[in-house]
Image (cartoon, rainbow, N blue to C red):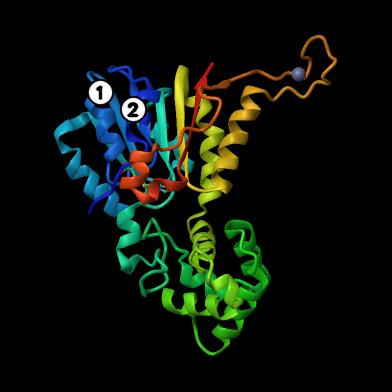
Amino acid sequence: MRHESVLLQECVRYLDIDPSGIYVDGTLGMGGHAEAVLEKLGGGMLVGIDRDDRALAFSRERLARFGGKARLVKGSFGDLGQILDSLGIQKVNGMLFDLGVSSPQLDDKERGFSYMQDAPLDMRMDESAPLSARDVLNTYSEAELRSIFWRYGEERYAGRIAAAVVAARERGPVETTGQFVDIIRSTMPAAALREKQHPAKRCFQAVRIEVNDELGQLERMLDQAPDRLVRGGRLLVISFHSLEDRLVKEAIRKRENGCTCPPDFPVCTCGFVKTLRSVTRKPVVPDGEELAGNPRARSARLRIAEKV
Ligand SMILES: C[S@@+](CC[C@H](N)C(=O)[O-])C[C@H]1O[C@@H](n2cnc3c(N)ncnc32)[C@H](O)[C@@H]1O
Ligand SMILES: [Zn+2]
C-alpha cells in the first residue's frame, strides 16, 4: 500500500509544532502526515483517528516505533469532542484533517470507490457501517437520487441519471460499479462523454459523500474543533472539492469575522467574539513539483486557522 501525503511539508510547517504538545490527525489514513508530526514530538502526543480499520491497522504498524506517543482510535472526526473526552484530553495544540479517500481505498477494487474498475458497489470507509452505495442506489427514491447527484456531484444530468437508475433497478438490483458507470454513460449525450473528466466521476463522488456522510461529519468537526484548541493552536484542513472547501472557508469566516452589526455602528453590539484567525489569506496549494509527482494533489487546498 502506498500513499503520497499531500502538502506534507506545508502541513508540518503550518502546524508550528511544539514538541511537548498534543496533536490530532483526524484522517490518519496511511499515517504519512502523522509520522511527520510524530518525528517532531518530544514529550508530546499524537491522537490519530480514522474510521477505516484497514488504515488503522496499517498505521498502527507504521507508527509502532513511536510507542505510546501515538494514540490511534477508530472513529469519525465528527465525534472529535467525544473521542478527546474518552482520552481525557481537554485541549490540543493543533489538528490536521486531510479529507477524502486514500489511494489504497481507491486502488483496492473490492471497496467499490473507483469507476475505473468493476467491483461490488460499496464505498464505505468504515466497512462496519450500515449504509453502502448498493443500498443508496437500490433503495433511495428517484427524487433523493437526483438531489444527491445534483448537490454532492454538481452533476448537470442528475435528473436523467436518477431516472435511469430507477429504470435499471426495476429489471434487477444495481450491484456493481460497472453497472452504475454504464447507466451513467447511457444517459449522457455524446458530447458530454467526450469531456476530459470521466463521465461517472461526479456521480461517484456524490454517492460516496452520501454513503459516508462526508459533509455532515465535516460540519460536525468544524463545530467542535475551535473549542478544543489552545490559544495559538492551529486547525489545518485539506479539502479536495469545492463543497468541502466552502464549508471550511465559511466555518473560519464566521469565527473570524461573524459580526452582524450594521457597518455604520461605532462599536460591535451583536455579541460576536472572534475565536479564529486565518493564517494565510488564500488556501495553500501544492507546488509544481508535487503536482508532477502526485496527480491526487491536483485539487488539494489547505486552509489554516489559528485559535485566538
Ligand atoms: C486522504 S486519506 C488521509 C491520508 C493521510 N493523511 C496520510 O498521510 O496517509 C483520508 C483518510 O481519512 C479517513 N476519513 C475520511 N472521513 C473520515 C471521518 N469522518 N472520520 C475519520 N476518518 C475519516 C479515510 O478513511 C482515509 O483513510
Ligand atoms: Zn457585531
Q: Residue 12 shows which numbered tag?
A: 2
Q: Residue at x 45, y 31 (%)?
A: 236
Q: Residue at x 32, y 67 (%)?
A: 109
Q: Residue 70 shows which numbered tag?
A: none
Vertical position of residue 164 compared to residue 268: above or below = below
Residue 241 in view here: yes
Residue 54: give x, y in percent of width and height.
27, 54
Mark 2–mark 1 distance (CA, rounded to whole Å): 9 Å
- Indicate the secondary structure of the residue bearing disc 2: helix
Q: Quadrant of the N terminus?
A: bottom left
Count neighbours of disc 2 (C-alpha within 10 A) and say few if under 14, some if 14 to 19, many if 20 or more.
some
Residue 289: give x, y in percent of width and height.
33, 39
Tell me: 126 left or right of 78: left
User: Hey, which residue is sitting farthest top in the picture?
Assistant: 266
Vertical position of residue 31 compared to residue 149: above or below = above
Residue 8: give x, y in percent of width and height.
33, 35
Mark 1, ligand 1, within 8 Å: the answer is no
Tell me: 24 left or right of 207: left
Q: Amino acid at mark 1?
A: Lys
Q: Amino acid at mark 2?
A: Val
Residue wearing tag 1: 40
Residue 240: give x, y in percent of width and height.
48, 47
Tell me: 80 left or right of 265: left
**216 or 293, nearer to the observer:** 293
Point out the frontmost of discs 2 and 1.
2
User: Hey, which residue is sitting farthest left in the picture?
Assistant: 65
Q: Quadrant of the C terminus?
A: top right
Q: Assess whether mark 1 and mark 2 are in contact (beta carbons under 8 angstroms).
A: yes
- Indicate the secondary structure of the residue bearing disc 1: helix
